[in-house]
Amino acid sequence: MRRLTVVQLLPALHSGGVERSTLEIGAALVAAGHRSIVISAGGRLVERLVAGGSEHIELPVGRKSLLAAPGTLRRLRAALARIGPDIVHARSRLPAWLAWFALRGLPAPPPRFVTTVHGLNSPGRYSGIMARGERIICVSDTVRDHVVRHWPRTDPARLVVIPRGIDPAQFPRGHRAPADWRGRLAAEHPVLAEGRLLLMPGRGTRLKGHADAIELLARLRGAGEDARLWLLGTREPGREAYVAELEALARERDVAGQLVISPPRHDVVEAYAVADLVLQLSNKPEAFGRTVIEALSVGRPVLGWDHGGVGELLRELYPLGAVRRGDHDALASTARAMLSGPAPMPVTMPYTLAAMQSATLELYAGLVHH
């Protein structure tokens, strides 16, 4: 197969799922001997991207300013003309619009245009650019259904579901947290030293359903379970008012002494390993449920609302953990059943990083040699 030049566009490279996928595909391209270029406004992940063999071009392709757009468009078109890529892959709406117009002015044959729909974008013309790729990658069946429903003129043959994946080596089955790690955790958060640990990893936003987790904690304790709840990653700068609201709710439900709300951490695999139950209670459907596959990969039971990408993964991999959204009685009774004896884990984890990388590279090759 000949060497390809692939340009990926996204707003910036700070942190997040889109950013992670961009780096993962960059790494796969480099490993396969292709040329990988990323265009973004920069950010702390640029160093890691470049260390992995990709190139980075800094352009404000995510800046929502009509004044800046014509200049950015000109610079983007000039960069693409200079590079002569085989594939231009847009991962976000504004960069996709800029790429779409930039490609219009390039000599024939122009690069092939690919988009990835990472989220359940709001219906309408602005988001509709994501449905204009020659190939439209959807990160789950939930996302594919969303695109078909809201942009019905999209040719279904152009839609390809490539789920996001994890590296099983980073989330090994049966992983055990070292004793000194558990000791440090207990010293930092004495509440988590004993009892049954409910872990809910997620950013400090209302969408993640932290209030439902606190309600579950109250119901479990009311039923005689010595449950403790760790909201990991919720305490973030700018989220103080929301955290205060959660703390007030915990006091009102009389579980403030069994709750820990902590900032994000890098050792989340250890946190999964010590959890008795992992929660995913987003109140808005998610495009994909990454924490579901991370926890199941480690071998920990997961309980979540049965909707969106989370419901999709639970129904396939761990059906006992999928509960009808908003049914707090069923959530509490399922949690009690799981704490007394969790269902067996899925034998294999189909959602791997390697599968996602190879499917994406195959898609690129198929388009270029088409």
Image: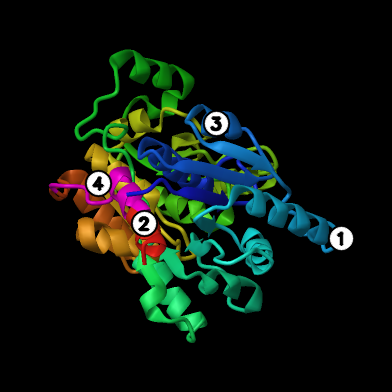
Label 2 or label 4, whichever comes before in sequence order? 4
Amino acid type, residue under disc 4 in the picture:
Pro
Question: Which corner quadrant of the image does residue 319 belong to?
Answer: bottom left
Would you name the residue on which mark 2 appears? 365
Amino acid type, residue under disc 3 in the picture:
Val
Would you name the residue on which mark 4 appears? 301
Under circle 1, the secondary element is loop
Label 1 or label 2, whichever comes before in sequence order? 1
Tell whether 314 sits left or right of 143: left
Q: Residue at x 50, y 57 (%)?
A: 87
> In this rendering, which labeled residue sits more in front, label 4 or label 1?
1
Q: Position of residue 267 (x, y in %)?
A: 41, 27
Cα distance between the residues tagged 1 and 3: 30 Å
Would you name the residue on which mark 3 appears? 50
Would you name the residue on which mark 1 appears? 67
Q: Is residue 170 placed above or below 92 in the rendered structure?
A: above
Q: Residues within 10 Å of mark 1 (few under 14, many from 20)?
A: few
Amino acid type, residue under disc 2 in the picture:
Ala
Q: Which residues are magenta?
A: 347-361
Label 1 or label 3, whichever comes before in sequence order? 3
Under circle 4, the secondary element is loop
Label 4 or label 3, whichever comes before in sequence order? 3
> In this rendering, which labeled residue sits more in front, label 1 or label 2?
2
**Depth order, front residue of 142/24:** 24
Label 2 or label 3, whichever comes before in sequence order? 3
Q: Is residue 13 placed above or below 163 in the rendered structure?
A: above
